[in-house]
Amino acid sequence: MNRVSFPRAVVLSACALLSMPVWAKTQAPPAPALPKNIVFVLVDDLRYDAMGFLTKGLQTPNIDHLAKNGVYFPNAVVTSSLCSPSRATILTGQSARNHGVIDNNNSSEKGLVFFPSYLQQAGYQTGFFGKWHMGNDTDAPRAGFDKWVSFKGQGTYFPTEQLSPQQVAAGQRQMLNVDGRAVKRTGYITDELTDYAMGWLEKERDPSKPFFLYLSHKAVHSDPLPPDRYKDLYRDLPIALPASMANTPENNLGKPMWVRNQRNSWHGADFPYHTDRDLREQVRDIYRTLSPVDESLGRILAYLRKAGIEKDTMIVFYSDNGFLFGDHGLIDKRNAYEPSVRVPMVVYAPGMVPRGVTNPAVVRNLDLAPTFLDVAHVPEPKQMEGRSWLALAEGKVTPADWKPGDFVYEYYWEWTFPMTPTTFAIERDRVKYIQYHGVWDIEELYDLDRDPGEMHNLIDDPAYLSRKIALRHALFAQLGNTQGRHVVPYTEKTSSGVTWRAVDGPHAADFPPGWYRRPNLPSKMNDIFPDSIAKAAASAADKSFVPNRGTQK
């Protein structure tokens, strides 16, 4: 069978290859009348390829069912790869520079409008279940939701986690906020959230109205803790860590100093979370913790079928950000590399979207809110920056005709985890340019078609000079906020942040070899001027350069 090849490097299992037809040959079924019920399942920190139909040995039968019978988007990305900023983007349809939730610490939600409020106005019943993780570490109900079940901050997997034996013996438990009431936790978090969601679906909502269910799991956030029933799953599953994890001259060539220095840190492969734990076992625990999420999806699917509303419901499976499994010596997310910005995304809506399609179009978390409103026939509010992908998923718009513009990425330095600098990036026509703010380091440029693993930094390649210049200009222009200002925000620093290095780990990286030069060279001031072909020629000849005057001796 011929298949369309999608741009980023994704390896599909043999089963998936056989079950997903060529895009161009797939005919979308006629769309039923709107509005649809919507189930949005958000997973935390799930890597883009951590689904059974993509990773051999990983068991996710319900996620696989959605992909086999819906539309899989291998090139879904997030505009900020961090929990709170990404979640705020999902809820507001705005980028971090405009919604202002810029880190995981204490960003304000003041003045923000969350898209479920518009759904309520359109007659939807709305329910939120799970991790909110924004705004003053409070679990209080937010506007836009008829039903509310949440917890403070990151939450915990188990009711007695992070409590002392004395507290447990005294009857203390981690708490949930249920419609404004404090309720003691009773079970494993994924199961408990699903129980509340199912109770709302089955007994509490008005069945005469369409519904929007937002199920926001804590899983699989680190440190992932599976329930006892899955603690031994994948014990013998081989885990292949990425080749770029090795600390070798070949892998380090062209990488910024901050990347090489981060590998021996909280977010590095040599000192992960300041432990000596084998990353392969960490990956197994992520997979084990995903299993209850897959079970949860199975429960929702079973209910939709039993209630006879499966064909009236759209399910979107997504993650708030990606995750690195040692790629480039790093773990976690935050940076602009592919495993950080790419997320799993599957859309399932029988009779509305085609079955078994792999759609290569780039879609963003910025586009979710406009799409959910589109499903409900609600016009996109003027403050939203994204674009509905509903027609794309339905097959009414082809990937070639889907033109959302450049993919622009922003991450703002956090004092709590200071190892990743403020990062800005832009991708256009499969070329990605990355720059860092406030650090003495190099930029990066990758041709993702030729180099999907981002191993060959082309930032100084003469063949890419014009594209580098164009992307720099475009990135700056598009990073302006709604007031046209270019601002790097930050929140209050109250401690040193997590700064340790493994005592026997690698020490600080050396400067790039090209930075070491003899004194008094004529070209020593050239790089204060904008890049150009003329400047490149002057620098190559070790001549001074001044714009509009050409080269000088």
Image (cartoon, grey):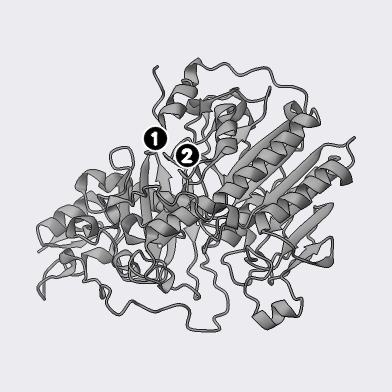
- Say which residue appears at 72% left-offset and 50% top-offset: 194
Q: In this view, does 392 lie above or below 108?
A: above
Q: What residue type is labelled 2?
A: Asn
**Residue 342 placement, left or right of 31:** left
Which residue matches tag 1?
Answer: 7
Question: Which numbered circle lies on residue 75?
Answer: 2
Image coordinates for residue 460, horizontal then vertical, percent: 22, 53
Element assignment for label 2: loop
- The tag on residue 504 is none
Identified at 70% across, 21% down, the residue is 31
Residue 533 vs residue 467, the one in the foreground: 467
- What is the secondary structure assignment of the residue under circle 1? loop
Foreground residue, 461 or 118? 118
Pointers 1 and 2 in contact (C-beta within 8 Å): yes
Is residue 424 in view from this perspective?
no
The mark nearer the N terminus, 1 or 2, is 1
The vertical placement of 527 against 303, above or below, is: below
Residue located at (21% from left, 56% from top): 535
Q: How many marks?
A: 2
The amino acid pointed to by label 1 is: Pro
Taking depth in this image into account, of 223 and 207 the one nearest to the observer is 223
User: Could one spot residue 242 in this view of the protein?
Assistant: yes
Give coordinates of residue 207: x percent, y percent: 88, 37
Q: How crowded is mark 2: few (under 14 residues within 10 Å), some or many (20 or more)?
A: many
